[in-house]
Image: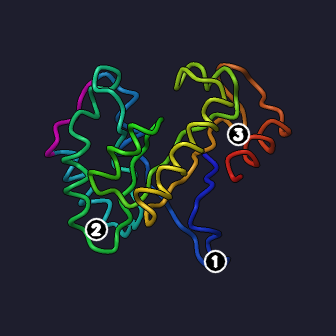
Amino acid sequence: VARLTSMGAIPQDRVLISEVGPRDGLQSVQATMPTADKLRWIDALVAAGLREIEVGSFVPVHLLPQMADVAEVVRHALTHPGVTVMALAPNLRGAQAALAAGVHKVTLPVSASAAHSLANVRKTREAMVEEVRAVVQWRHAAAPGALIEVGLSTAFGCTLQGAVPEDDVLWLAALCAE
C-alpha cells in the first residue's frame, strides 16, 4: 500500500514502519479475535518497537463484526506514549467516529483499480476522491490537528482487475494529494 499523508515527507534518514495487522489482518478472516487478545497484540507490537499502528476500522459492524470493539482498542492503544494510533475509515462518518475515539491519524482507502474500488468500498475511484475531500474539509473546520492519510491500494496490480496502468495510479495520487 502506497501512503500519501498530510504530515509531509518522512526525512530521508528515517524509515517509518506502519503496522496494519490489527486492522488488515483481522478484517479479512471470519473469526473475531477477543478484545483482550487484540490489546495484548498491540502491547506486543509496542514492545517490539513499533511506533505507528493501525488498530482497526471504523466501519458498520454488520459489514465487519471483527471491528465492533474498535473504540475500546483505540482507547487502549492510546495508553502507549509515543505511539501514533491510526484507524481506517472509508467515509466521513467513519473518520468522524475515529477522531472522536481519539486516533491520531485516519487512513482513507482509495483503490487505484476501478474494480477493487467498487468491490471494497462500493464506490468509484472518483467518489472516493470526493470522500477524501469531504473528510479533509471537515477536518479543517472541526479537527485541524488531526492527520489524514490516503492508503492508495492496488497500485501495483489487482487480484480482480489484473494490471493497473501506471497512469491511473499517478492520476489518482495527484487527485488525492490535491
User: Badge 2: few (under 14), some or many (20 or more) residues near its Cα, within 10 Å?
Assistant: few
Q: Which residue is mark 3?
A: 155
In front: 176, or 62? 176
The circle on residue 11 is 1
The circle on residue 167 is none
Q: Amino acid at mark 3?
A: Ala
The circle on residue 47 is 2
Relative vertical location of residue 164 with respect to residue 83 in this rendering, above or below: above
Residue pictured at 21% horizontal, 39% vertical: 69
User: Which quadrant, please, contains the N terminus?
Assistant: top right
Quick check: is 64 in the magenta stretch?
no
Q: CA distance from mark 3 to mark 2?
A: 32 Å
Q: CA distance from mark 1 to mark 2?
A: 24 Å
Residue pictured at 63% horizontal, 43% vertical: 152
Looking at the image, is mark 1 or mark 2 earlier in the sequence?
1
Q: Give coordinates of residue 106: x percent, y percent.
A: 44, 51
Kindly state the secondary structure of the residue where label 3 is placed: loop
Q: Amino acid at mark 2?
A: Ala
Q: Amino acid at mark 1?
A: Pro
* Residue 52 figure quarter: bottom left
Looking at the image, is mark 3 or mark 1 earlier in the sequence?
1
| Residue span colored magenta | 31-36
